[in-house]
Image (tube, helix red, strand yellow):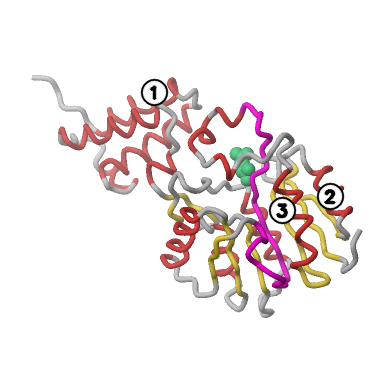
């Protein structure tokens, strides 16, 4: 009789398999293996540790093998779990929206620094996707109101569901291609994590990006098509002294700064992400065309 496969054995095998097939570091592969096993068995990590000598049933084994095979073929963990943590909260994600990245927490933190806690701010989030930026700002600043805009109805449905799940009452979602449906509404802060990857960038054909909505990632020959539109339209939607904060690619800071200057923004600054790369630029609308 062959000994049954234990959870400890499964974990070890899955780690080796993921490390090899995904070219992951062992540590990273172990984390992914643990996450996928816990998901397949519908248990938490503490349970996995306490029960590592248990043998899963054939049906459970089958479910785990299926998850591991999907991951080995490149499917992002966030889509397999249909959730991703952002700023300490769990958000629903599907292939209709970009997977939230830790880099974007810099955009949120920087925006929060511009919003005193006791002052109601009118915030616009352009290209909200799953709604992580809009919802986090709304929860951190309950006196403020957030208008979350996306051109994708499928994305807006996810943002709306996240907003409901997380109990926000100060987020309104509308379908609009950037400012198209906004008439002359004025905001104190505009934030955006727009598509900013050059259409020919080989990264689009690797890793998680292959599975994410292309229209949320790529933006013309230099990746700046959408950023150009967002910056050009911001002055007519900001109060004087209002802020525009944009996430962008690590090589785009100079171009974004120049665009902000051209359109009359002042106090322009670029901030670096956790990897030390230029990731967010911001400027204050001076009230005068540049
Ligand atoms: N930060 C993402 C990446 O480079 C891109 C997100 C975006 O284009 N807004 O993987």
Quadrant the N terminus occupies = top left
What's the residue at 67%, 80% (across, down)? 118
Left or right of 193, for residue 206: left
Instruction: Where is residue 19? Give x, y as percent.
Output: 44, 24
Q: Secondary structure at mark 2?
A: helix
Mark sitting on residue 16: 1
Q: Secondary structure at mark 3?
A: strand
Q: Nearer the viewer, mark 1 or mark 2?
A: 2
Is 196 one of the magenta-colored residues?
yes
Q: Which residues are magenta?
A: 178-202
* Separation of marks 1 and 2 at Cα, in angstroms: 47 Å
Left or right of 245, for residue 154: left
Against 43, residue 206 (above or below) is above
The residue that disc 2 covers is: 259
Q: Nearer the viewer, mark 2 or mark 3?
A: 2
Residue 44 or residue 161, whichever sits in front: 161
Left or right of 36, for residue 119: right
């Amino acid at each position: 009789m062959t000994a049954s496969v234990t959870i400890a054995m499964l974990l070890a095998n899955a780690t080796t398999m993921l490390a090899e097939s995904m070219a992951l570091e062992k540590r990273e592969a172990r984390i992914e293996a643990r996450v996928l096993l816990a998901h397949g068995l519908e248990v938490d990590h503490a349970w996995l540790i306490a029960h590592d000598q248990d043998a899963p049933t054939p049906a459970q084994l089958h479910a785990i093998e299926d998850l591991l095979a999907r991951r080995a073929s490149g499917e992002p963990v966030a889509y397999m779990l249909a959730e991703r943590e952002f700023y300490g909260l769990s958000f629903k994600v599907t292939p209709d929206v970009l997977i939230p990245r830790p880099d974007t927490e810099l955009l949120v933190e920087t925006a929060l620094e511009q919003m005193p806690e006791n002052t109601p701010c009118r915030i616009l989030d352009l290209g909200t996707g799953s709604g992580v930026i809009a919802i986090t700002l709304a929860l951190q600043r309950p006196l403020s109101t957030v208008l979350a805009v996306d051109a994708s109805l499928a994305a807006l449905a996810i943002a709306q569901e996240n907003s409901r799940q997380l109990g926000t009452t100060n987020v309104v979602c509308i379908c609009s291609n950037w400012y198209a449906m906004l008439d002359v509404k004025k905001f104190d802060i505009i934030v955006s994590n727009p598509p900013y990857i050059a259409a020919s960038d080989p990264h689009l054909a690797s890793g998680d990006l292959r599975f994410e909505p292309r229209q949320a990632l790529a933006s013309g020959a230099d990746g700046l098509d959408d950023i150009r539109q967002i910056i050009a339209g911001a002055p007519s939607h900001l109060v004087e002294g209002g802020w525009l904060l944009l996430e962008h690619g690590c090589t785009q800071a100079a171009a974004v700064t120049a665009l902000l200057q051209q359109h009359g923004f002042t106090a322009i600054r670029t901030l670096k992400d956790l990897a030390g790369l230029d990731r967010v630029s911001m400027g204050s609308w001076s009230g005068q065309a540049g």
